[in-house]
Structures are given as C-alpha cells and as structure tokens.
C-alpha cells in the first residue's frame, strides 16, 4: 500500500468528515470548526490529508500557537486503515512542518488510557509533560459576584498571571489546546479580550475555537468563588451551553474547590511534548 500526504483544503471537506466519522463515531466537531482548522481563519498551520493508494484514509492538523510552537490535533484514521502506517505518515509531515516553521517545541494531548496514541507519539520522541484534569461547571447555581473589567494591557496580564500560575501547571487550556505560559500567551490573551479583573481577583475566560459550544476558564487567582460566579453568569448571559475548566491534575486544592461547587469531572488528559534528544525508537528522519 502506497501512503502519501498532502495539504487539505475546503474541497476535501467531504472526505475529511468521512474520516472523522469513521475514526471516532459520535465525537465530531470538524464541520463546526472547518474555517478554523481547514481554512486557516485565524489559525496558522496545515490540515494534512493522508491517502492510501490514492484513497483518503487519515487526517491531522498542525497548528502554530502564539509562541511559535507546534500543536498537533484532530489526528484521525479511518477504521479500516488503522495500524497500517497512516498515523506515522501524518506524524512525518507534522515534524516537517515543525522544521519549516522553526517551532521551538511541539506538543499534543491524549487520554491517559489511550495507549495507541501515546505510543505513536513516543515513537516520534514525545514524552509526557503534564497530567490535567477537566471539569464542567454547573450553570444552574449562579450567584452574586463583583463587577469585573477587561484587561487588555499585556503588561498587566503578565503581572496578574505570570508569577501565580505554578499550581495550574505549565500550560493554559482552551478547547483541549494547551498553551505554555509566557509573554506570547499573555499578549494573545490580551488581544482576544479574555482576561478579566476585579480588585486582586483575575480570571481568564474564553475559547480558541467552537465558541458556540461554550466558554473555558484558563486561569483564576484571588477570590475563586467570586470569579467562578462571574464566569457562570457570563456564560449564561452570552447564551452559551457550557463552562469548562482544566488544571494540573496534582492541584489538590482545585479538585476540592471543584467538588465543593458541584462540578462534574469530565476526564483526565496527558500533554506530550517533543523531546529533541530522542534517540531510541524515534521516527524522525526515517
């Protein structure tokens, strides 16, 4: 079987949707995010289409995050083509794109129990960088909260987040996209109107894509109960159906906070990052 890859565009949408439906039935979002993931609207990178003897068999998206790093997402292979080298071919193109864009690092996420996905990434030199836990915030328990204002100055964003994020982990998460803390992220957040403050309390609230599905809390500091009430109220006021939060799995105080506020645990994920010193079982260059 000959496997080839090329850049996908909107003319490939029907084939891409068929791949998504076959790979993970019941978990689809490509059609909603097609402009972002295929059309590159506000998202630099490439949707990779893999073909087996000329037949569309797999896909994967390489995106460039605010700090220039690579983010690998929506890797899908049709059921009948799985475990036949399609994923390896997509990763080959991923790493070529990382070289072409000068990415300082490359990362992806997968479920803690997804051995196949984790093993494929490890073959390319990726290693587990951090564990995360996710929760869904109930929207029927709204409470009074302080008045919040937007913070659009990157310097103030950095002052409010930069030295306080250690408990949250190395990455801030929106739509299961994990971005490293640092100046490029703070500028990105400020430019997208995602940082709010009230006195000494700070909350990062927004989305990377699929905004119609709901909001995501990326970070909170100060009066967490007040910030959570603001986030829930903002979600309802915008007519959105859900509010999500993810944080480092070892952040025990936040787990207790989530339980106290009746949040629903939505699952645990691992973030894997490319290790440049990979020497064993590394597919790069093969």
Image (tube, rainbow, N blue to C red):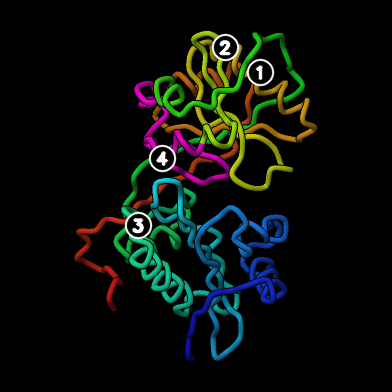
Residue at 51%, 22% (x, y): give it. 220
Q: Earlier in the sequence, mark 1 or mark 2?
A: 2
Residue 174 is tagged as none
Q: Nearer the viewer, residue 89 or 264?
A: 89
Residue at 46%, 72% (x, y): give it. 90
Residue at 48%, 22% (x, y): give it. 254
Q: Residues within 10 Å of mark 4 (few under 14, many from 20)?
A: some
Q: Could you give the CA–CA distance between mark 3 and mark 4, rounded to whole angstroms?
A: 14 Å
Residue 230 is tagged as 1
Residue 103 is tagged as 3
In magenta, the rendered stretch is 162-188
Q: Earlier in the sequence, mark 3 or mark 4?
A: 3
Q: Name above or below for residue 225 compared with residue 5.
A: above
| Magenta span contains residue 60 | no
- Tag 1 secondary structure: helix
- Please report contact status of discs 3 and 4: CB closer than 8 Å, yes or no: no
């Amino acid at each position: 079987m000959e496997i080839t890859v090329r850049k996908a565009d909107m003319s490939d949408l029907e084939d891409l949707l068929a791949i998504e439906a076959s790979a993970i039935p019941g978990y689809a979002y490509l059609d909603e995010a097609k402009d972002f993931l295929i059309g590159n609207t506000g998202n630099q990178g490439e949707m990779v289409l893999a073909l087996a003897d000329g037949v569309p068999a797999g896909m994967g998206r390489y995106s460039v995050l605010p700090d220039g790093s690579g983010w690998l997402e929506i890797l899908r292979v049709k059921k009948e083509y799985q475990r036949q080298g399609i994923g390896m071919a997509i990763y080959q193109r991923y790493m070529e794109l990382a070289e072409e864009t000068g990415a300082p690092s490359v990362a992806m996420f997968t479920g803690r129990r997804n051995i196949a996905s984790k093993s494929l990434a490890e073959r390319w030199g990726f290693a587990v960088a951090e564990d995360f836990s996710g929760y869904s915030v109930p929207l029927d328990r709204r409470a009074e909260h302080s008045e919040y204002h937007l913070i659009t100055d990157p310097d103030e964003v950095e002052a409010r987040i930069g030295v306080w994020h250690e408990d949250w982990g190395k990455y801030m998460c929106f739509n299961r996209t994990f971005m490293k803390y640092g100046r490029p992220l703070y500028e990105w957040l400020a430019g997208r109107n995602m940082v709010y403050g009230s006195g000494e309390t700070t909350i990062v609230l927004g989305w990377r894509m699929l905004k119609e599905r709901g909001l995501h809390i990326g970070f909170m500091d100060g009066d967490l109960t007040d910030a959570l009430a603001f986030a829930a109220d903002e979600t309802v006021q915008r007519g959105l159906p859900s509010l999500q939060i993810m944080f480092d799995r070892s952040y025990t105080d936040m787990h207790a906070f989530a339980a106290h506020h009746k949040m629903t645990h939505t699952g645990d994920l691992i973030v894997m990052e490319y290790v440049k010193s990979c020497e064993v079982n590394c597919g790069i260059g093969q």
